[in-house]
Image (tube, coloured by chain):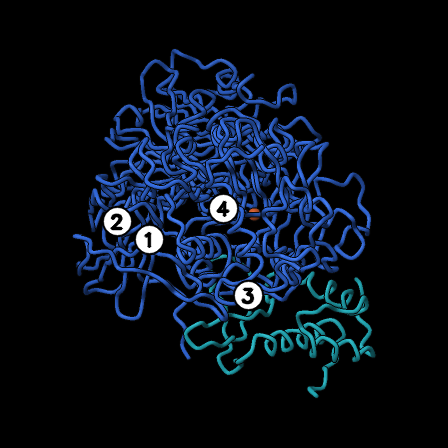
Amino acid sequence: MKKIDPSRTDLAHEFKAKPYGPHSPDLQKVLSVMRWRETPGKHVLVEIPALSQWVLGRLPASRGEPVELYDQTVFDRHEDGLWHLFKIRWEEHTGQRLESK
Amino acid sequence: MKLNQQKGLLAYADEISRQPGEAIEFKVSSSTPGAFELNIVQIQCGDDGPGGPGLKQTPVNASANGSYPARFQKTQVGSFIRIPSSEAFSPSALTLQALIYPTAPELGEQVIASHWCPAKKQGYALLIQDLRLTFEVTGSDGISHTLASDRPLVAGRWYLVAVSIDPDEGEVTLHQLIKEKGLELEQQNSIVSSHLGVSLSKLDAQFLIAGCAALDEDNDPLISQIYNGKIDSVQLHDAALDLPSIEASVLSPQQRTLVAAWDFSQKIEGDEVIDVSGNNHHGRTHNLPTRAVKGWRHDGTEMNWTHRPEHYGAIHFHDDDLYDSQWQTDVFWEVPEDLSSGVYAAHLQQDSEEFYVPFYVRPPRGKPTARLCLLVPTASYYAYVNNHMNVDWGSLIEQSSTCFATLTMADLYLQNQALFGLSMYDDHSDGSGVCYASRLRPMLRMGPHEELWQYNADSHITDWLAEKGFSFDVVTDDDLHAEGVSLIEGYDCVMTCTHPEYYSLPMMNALLSYQHQGGRFIYMGGNGFYWRVAYSPKFPGAIEMRRAEDGMRSWIAEPGEYHMSFSGELSGLWSRSGITPHELSGVGFSAQGFNFSRPYRRTAASLDPRCAWMFDGIAEDEAIGDFGLVFGGAAGSEIDSADVRKGTPSHALVVATADDFGADFHWVVEDYHHAHSAVNGEICPHVRCDMVFYETPNGGAVFSTGSIAFAGSLSHNHYTNNVSRLLENVVNRFLDSEPIE
Ligand SMILES: [Fe+2]
């Protein structure tokens, strides 16, 4: 499996500053590896238009099962939600937590 | 915050395009008792997102407007065959045999064939249970017997399966024999017998293939335990046949003992199921199981079912097929004679829920009421509608959108409610691709407030036309397919929407004829005229497509199954099917990316007097469309480019080009021969968006934007911007009767 180097926190900072990109080649590689995540248990965002917010969700193993919603983890900006997903994927890959700075 | 992940208020209509004087029926279901409000509205713009023009919908003073009692309507999901009731299906001695190719035996109980009366709780069923072929039978004595094979079934293999009942010996025998060319182990074979002392009593009940009659919690009938996979050569005999006789009867039905022998290789194009026994136990398919699929006889000698239908004697059933929800009508409305052509909807509201049912009012046949015609891509709407991409595409959704998955409420409803059916972008629960799509079911994302894709993105065009004061008629793909060029030949100019991707042969020919006759054609989108689809008079409201050979696609058609059941035509890309998108619009799909759109730059060719008029008011060095609601620019999302070798007319002018798309844009897969890394927008010369103009015979012309994002730039700065100006110049010139030559 393609590895993400946990020492490259500079790339995490780059993502946090510009979640939509354009991204440096090194960050593109990190994101491409992260995006291979398959559906079961994958963390996602769910847009709630009535509240203009995004809530953290987690996908089930198969169709017909509800998406788990974490209603304590809500974001006013889509970008903040993307950063949260980035941190989750980072930890999934590296086993290390990113400090929220 | 407790989010309801189910949609309670749902509806659809029996028709989508109506002319004044014709009726439309709305079918509504609500999970909440009480009443719902229905109001007919005309929709100019549905984009009320950030920076968007806002919701612009006008009430129509319609006799149908009002309050109606809400009721819940049930939906039968899953495909099967129903043979009308007969006592002949319960002879005292019996053999039931079939070739089966299960595709998801792990998905619970699935009935291969049944003759069961749920009220009397009598009858029999041959099914898959715990991965094993199983026979269940209950006689008039009410005693149930079960016999199961001692070997599990493997998915994706052909088996001959049979059950026989010998009443004299009181013996039931179950056969399971692998029927594959390859080195499948005969250890998968199984023959089990048991002295069960079964006595079948005469039962006046229907015979079902791929499902079983049942009663739901309200005692309403439904078909349950839908089978996933292919079934071929189902036969019922009134004798207990031994294995040699069963095998012989597969090849040549044993007429002497036959009660029924269903030959699915007949009438493949429709829903009829033919009994060749001579006893006329014909039936019909329900909910569009996939036909024109390889049967157990397929040996690789023929890839087109129309040439050798006997090799296509199977039907592929799915527990999630849905053609027609078959709801009752709640609201009936006759479109008034004086209602102008346009984009309309029934807007339903109940408590905090709302739902839109889209429909279009076209002008009376042969009587255009404007000089400009907007062609609404309903076939492409059907292809996408109710897609499960955000959840079910797995890693592909994030790799292709280059963003972590972000779901909407619609995704949650689709995840939780099977009643929506699937889209042509989805896989069935057994992993096979979905090749039919229908509008006879509630359609999500087909109204205002939704994402800027298809329906709501197309409302940027109706909004711009209205704001600029252009009067226009509206017609749909369905009309164009049915009526051909006669539908549009009365217009000076025909304009598409942002993503007319799915096209039938009559639709392609209609647009070509229109161009030959001197019509002016504006292609307002990207990735257009891409997939070849078929409509069918036998399945109104449905289309078919096979993702054959190549293309940017969500699934891959099975080898030998590239020809559509509706028509026999080879499906797949139009670029490999005789008429290229370039021949129709001067451009064809070249790349896609879903983050940063780009502006166009004028080319030297734009100075040519043949086209310079369209740049009136636009400086030579201006960036055209470095703004917009779709990823911030006019060229983006899915983009096209010109190529004379692919059919772009050699006199066509590429008047503007957008380039420098970023690393997240990618060249289309069908155009490169070997996999390599140089396919993204930073390095690949094919990742390019061309705006094209050319003259056509008899004073006509074509103008193509080649970009899905284009229409999203029109409203910028209160419709005063160079994208709007350019299009206005083109529309004005195209409506000018002075020949373009
Ligand atoms: Fe598309």
Q: Are marks 3 and 1 in contact (CB under 8 Å)?
A: no
Q: Secondary structure at mark 1?
A: strand
- The image shows residue B98 at horizontal and vertical percentages of 47, 27
Q: Which residue is mark 3?
A: A59
- The image shows residue B429 at horizontal and vertical percentages of 51, 48
Q: Alpha carbon of mark 3 to alpha carbon of mark 1: how far? A: 29 Å
Q: Alpha carbon of mark 2 to alpha carbon of mark 3: how far? A: 34 Å
Q: Which mark is residue B357?
A: 1
- The image shows residue B458 at horizontal and vertical percentages of 47, 53
Q: Are marks 1 and 4 in contact (CB under 8 Å)?
A: no
Q: Residues within 10 Å of mark 4 (few under 14, many from 20)?
A: many
- Above or below residue B509? Residue A24 is below
Using the rendered view, name the quadrant where residue A44 is placed: bottom right
**Which callout, 2 or 4, points at the residue further toward the start of the chain?**
2
Chain on which label 1 sits: B
Q: State left or right for residue B713 relative to residue B195.
A: right
Q: Quadrant where the C terminus of chain B lies?
A: top right
Q: Which mark is residue B26?
A: 2
Amino acid marked by disc 2? Phe
Q: Which residue is mark 4?
A: B731
Q: Residues within 10 Å of mark 3 (few under 14, many from 20)?
A: many
Q: Alpha carbon of mark 2 to alpha carbon of mark 4: how far? A: 36 Å
Q: Residues within 10 Å of mark 1 (few under 14, many from 20)?
A: many
Closer to the eye: label 1 or 4: 4
Amino acid marked by disc 4? Val
- Above or below residue A19? Residue B610 is above
Q: Are marks 2 and 1 in contact (CB under 8 Å)?
A: yes
Chain letter, colour cyan: A
Q: Secondary structure at mark 2?
A: strand
- The image shows residue B210 at horizontal and vertical percentages of 42, 37
Q: Residues within 10 Å of mark 2 (few under 14, many from 20)?
A: some
- Of B299 and B360, nearer the camera is B360
